[in-house]
Structures are given as C-alpha cells and as structure tokens.
Image (tube, grey):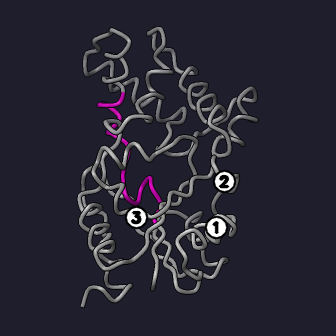
C-alpha cells in the first residue's frame, strides 16, 4: 500500500459524549442544567437525530429535502440537524443552534487515542494520507487544533467536491489528489459507505467505532502497509 484514505467520524475521531454535548450547549445559551434533566434531553435528542449519532428514527416531511442533501451543502447540514433538534422541546432559546455549533469546534470532538501516533508513523514513512468524509462543514480547523494537520496530505470532504461515499468517484478523487493509484491505496473507515471504496479498486479496512478518547485499532493500518513488522 502506497497511500491511505481515512474516514473522519468513527475512525479518527468521535463526537463528545451526549451528556457533555447537552451541558455545553445549554451553558452557551446561559442555562445551567441539572444532570438528570440533561440526561433526559440527551436521550431524546439522540433519538431525534444527532450528527455523529445513530440515524434518526423518523425524518419529518419538512426536513426531508435538507436531510437528503445534508452532506452536499453546508446550509443543508445545519438545517437538517438543527431542525431535528428543534423537534425536542428543551425550553431553551437558541438551543438547537448551540448544539450544532459544538460540531464546528474541536472541543466538540475527541480524536481517538491512537490517531496521532498512527498518522505520525505513516507520515514519517512518507505515506500520503487523505481524510475522506461525508460531512457538511470544514474539519481542517479541528486537525489544526489537535496538532494533526501536518500529517494529512489532502482533505476530501463531500460538501466541497459534490460526491458522497460510497460513490466510487470520491475515493478516486482522493487517490488522484495524493498521487496514488486506487489499487495501491487502502481505505480505513467504520461503515458500509467506507467499504464502498472496493468498487473504486481500493483495499478496505472497516473498524468498529470506539467510544470517545479510546483506541480504535488504527495501528492495524501500519501492518497492512508493511510498516509494522
């Protein structure tokens, strides 16, 4: 393997725990929630649909269009997830936007504990790296804040290039940008969408998403590239 493509959410990083998410968003709105109320809100919001969480059980008809386009356009991504959050009555003015804004800052995420060492090892061996994500906002500032941006050759984000995994073209685009033929590249992700890379000719490693801050098995990429012997 001469190049590595990594998914972002569930592969290199995870969103903050639900309770932390709700408490931080409420605080941004000037409200201090007791843990019991915050836990109930977190459960309801996850059921309604949280970015980085399980898929919603139901998409309200008024949100169907922005939901379908959420990873293609930044305004649709925000509208979809703030709209879903608004289906939960929190009694807090501006709460849906505050919840969404946690996605946009590094503090709303936790890189997996083995992400930095894995990316550094690959970079140190001259292996080009692309981060390929279905997402509706720029994650470059997150990598900069975590000290990881220097390890990434290219960011290939769905809302910027107009392609969404598992579309083979997003993987082909990433390979082209890092100068590696698809058959000499490895896609590392956590979902069936990431496994779609096989249709573009890439080998694929699917790792189950871990809890925030834990190791996610990323060292396996070093063995698959022949760097760990």
The segment highlighted magenta reads 6-21
76 shown above or below 91 = below
Task: Tell which circle, 3 or 2, labels the residue nearer the N-terminal end.
Answer: 2
- The residue carrying mark 3 is 208
Relative to 12, 183 lies left or right: right
Residue 32: horizontal and vertical position, in percent? 27, 12
Q: Name the residue under label 2.
A: 161
Q: Compared with residue 135, is residue 223 higher up or lower down, i.e. above or below?
A: below
Determine which residue is flagged by label 1: 173
CB under 8 Å between callouts 2 and 1?
yes
- Front-most of residues 88 and 125: 125
Whole-number angstrom distance, CA of label 2 to CA of label 1? 9 Å
Is residue 183 toward the left or the right of residue 37 in the image? right
What is the x, y in percent for residue 94? Answer: 48, 13
Asked which secondary structure carries label 1, the reply is helix
Callout 2 environment at 10 Å: few (<14), some (14 to 19), or many (20+)? few
Pointer 2 or 1: first along the chain: 2
- The answer to whether 227 is drawn above or below residue 187 in the figure is below
The reply to whether the magenta stretch includes residue 76 is no
Q: Nearer the viewer, mark 1 or mark 3?
A: 1
Reading the chain from its start, which is encountered first: label 1 or label 3? 1
Residue at the image point whose x is 45% and y is 55% from the top: 8
Q: Image quadrant for the C terminus? A: bottom left
Frontmost residue, 71 versus 151: 151
Name which residue lies at 70% across and 52% down: 162
User: Badge 3, how many Cα within 10 Å: few under 14, some, many 20+?
Assistant: few
In which image quadrant can residue 16 be found?
top left
- Circle 3: element type: loop
């Amino acid at each position: 393997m001469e190049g590595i493509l990594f998914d972002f959410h569930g592969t290199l990083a995870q969103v903050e725990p639900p309770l932390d998410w709700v408490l931080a968003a409420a605080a941004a709105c000037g409200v201090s929630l007791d843990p019991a109320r915050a836990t109930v809100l977190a459960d309801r919001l996850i059921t309604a649909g949280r970015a980085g969480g399980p898929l919603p059980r139901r998409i309200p008809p008024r949100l169907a269009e922005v939901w379908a386009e959420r990873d293609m356009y930044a305004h649709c991504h925000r509208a979809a997830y703030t709209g879903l959050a608004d289906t939960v009555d929190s009694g807090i003015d501006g709460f849906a936007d505050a919840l969404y804004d946690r996605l946009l800052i590094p503090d709303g995420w936790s890189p997996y504990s083995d992400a930095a060492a894995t990316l550094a090892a690959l970079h140190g061996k001259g292996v080009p790296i692309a981060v390929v994500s279905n997402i509706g906002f720029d994650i470059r500032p997150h990598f900069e804040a975590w000290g990881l941006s220097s390890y990434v050759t290219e960011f290939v984000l769905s809302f910027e290039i107009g392609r969404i995994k598992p579309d083979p073209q997003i993987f082909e685009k990433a390979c082209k940008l890092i100068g590696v033929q698809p058959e000499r590249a490895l896609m590392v992700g956590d979902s069936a969408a990431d496994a779609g890379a096989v249709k573009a000719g890439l080998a694929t490693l699917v790792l189950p998403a871990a809890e925030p801050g834990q190791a996610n098995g990323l060292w396996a990429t070093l063995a698959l590239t022949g760097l760990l012997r």
